Image (cartoon, rainbow, N blue to C red):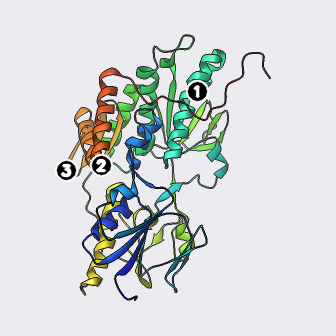
Amino acid sequence: MTKGPLRVVIVGAGFAGLNAAKALRQEPVHITIVDRRNFHLFQPLLYQVAAAALNPSDIAYPIRSIFRRQENVRSVLLAEVTGINLSDKTLSLDDASVLPYDYLILATGATHSYFGHDDWEEVAPGLKTLEDALLLRQRILAAFEEAERNPDDADRLLTFVVVGGGPTGVELAGALIEIAVHSLGKEFDVIDPTRARVLLVEGAPHVLPVYPEDLSDSARRQLETLGVEVLTGTMVSEIDEGGVTLSDGRRIESGLVLWAAGVQASKLGDILGVETDRTGRVHVEGDMSVPGHREVFVVGDLATVPGVPGVAPAAMQMGRHAGRMIEADLRMRSRFPFHYRNKGALATIGRARAVADFGQVRFGGFLAWVAWLAIHIFYLIGFRNRVLVLISWAWSYLTFRRGARIITGVPRLPEKGEP
């Protein structure tokens, strides 16, 4: 151990990393936070940015602003970890510098998994980062613009396929229908956006497969009421620029395929050089530490803990637990195992449609949507963000309009007759 306050390095400023730092706010330690981005991202609302309902700044908040009043957060580094030396207790950063630590908390989350078909990523973008959301928004809105210019190909261009029927897939499918029917329905001269076709493809027998069956059935009914075509028990065997081929041989011609089917832990699991599962998540001890290294904790989607889902509340609890274990060491107290407290699960399907699972209490429809709305606004970082999101949602709900419909980064489409 070093002289003076212990050095705690937290890699990743997502839900787990932020809660780890806050759990240590009263402790005599020096905290350094390392992240590739300078902001915390509220990932559960990424699809709202992709669906042009919210602006990026509504769901992102600068890391430095979050911790401006926490005195023991001594440094916030915009950097990427390229190496970890467990024996020397140091991190290598992308600028070739070395960062020492006494305690290390790894909370770098997860990214897309294409189940061995990495070539699909170019034609079927996923949704994990703010850049992903902006790319999806660009491609969704551009599909309608291209259909206006090429009405003979409108049926294909306005067929959207969402692969994966988990919460992200369900939310995207519902949002796509709402864009077409409510936001763009009367704004085009040649095409009829309300004729857009949205298909949700899920390999399991039900959408939202981790939810109770009655809620999964409720979600399916609500999706179908909106106009989404739900294909369950169906896998995708091929994806290309023209659409998808299903496992039963059916071909769906599509202008845009969206990927929401799988996740892979960040590469830090491999860099760490310890045992991981097939998705790259690190096997941890009961107290969330790495086996053989009590000073290193892995939390959030980077850790594999039996019975604990990869959701934001679980990541927040893991982060707090890692902070408390460091606190226990400082106070010469015994560590204790992590216990996940399931506070329920919610998934929104569209305007005034959602499902909620609070254990003994399960329901769907408008009340579930209100609960989803309240909980998500409560957990947004910063008062300004809460107010802006509430105003944006209220405006969208009352007017059926979406205010973030800006297409960026798309080259000009050629005029007729141009090569």
Say which quadrant the C terminus sits in.
top right
- Residue farthest toward the top in the current orientation of the protein: 189
Q: Residue at x 38, y 67 (%)?
A: 306
> How far from the left and from the top, in percent, is residue 29?
33, 77
Q: Earlier in the sequence, mark 3 or mark 2?
A: 3
**Dot label at residue 143:** 1
Q: Residue at x 32, y 32 (%)?
A: 393
At label 1, counting other C-alpha atoms closer than 10 Å, the crowd grade (few under 14, some 14-19, many 20 or more) is some
Residue marked by disc 2: 382
Q: Earlier in the sequence, mark 3 or mark 1?
A: 1
Callouts 2 and 1 close, C-beta under 8 Å: no
Q: CA distance from mark 3 to mark 1?
A: 43 Å
Task: Please tell me in which quadrant of the rendered image residue 307 appears.
Answer: bottom left
Does residue 66 sit above or below 137 in this rendering? below
Say whether residue 203 is visible.
Answer: no
At label 2, counting other C-alpha atoms closer than 10 Å, the crowd grade (few under 14, some 14-19, many 20 or more) is some
Does residue 25 sit above or below 89 in this rendering? above
Closest to the observer, 40 or 153: 40
Pair 3/2: label in front: 2
Quick one: SS at disc 1?
helix
> How far from the left and from the top, in percent, is residue 295?
40, 81
**Dot label at residue 360:** 3
Quick one: SS at disc 3?
loop
Say which quadrant the N terminus sits in.
bottom left
Q: Amino acid at mark 2?
A: Gly
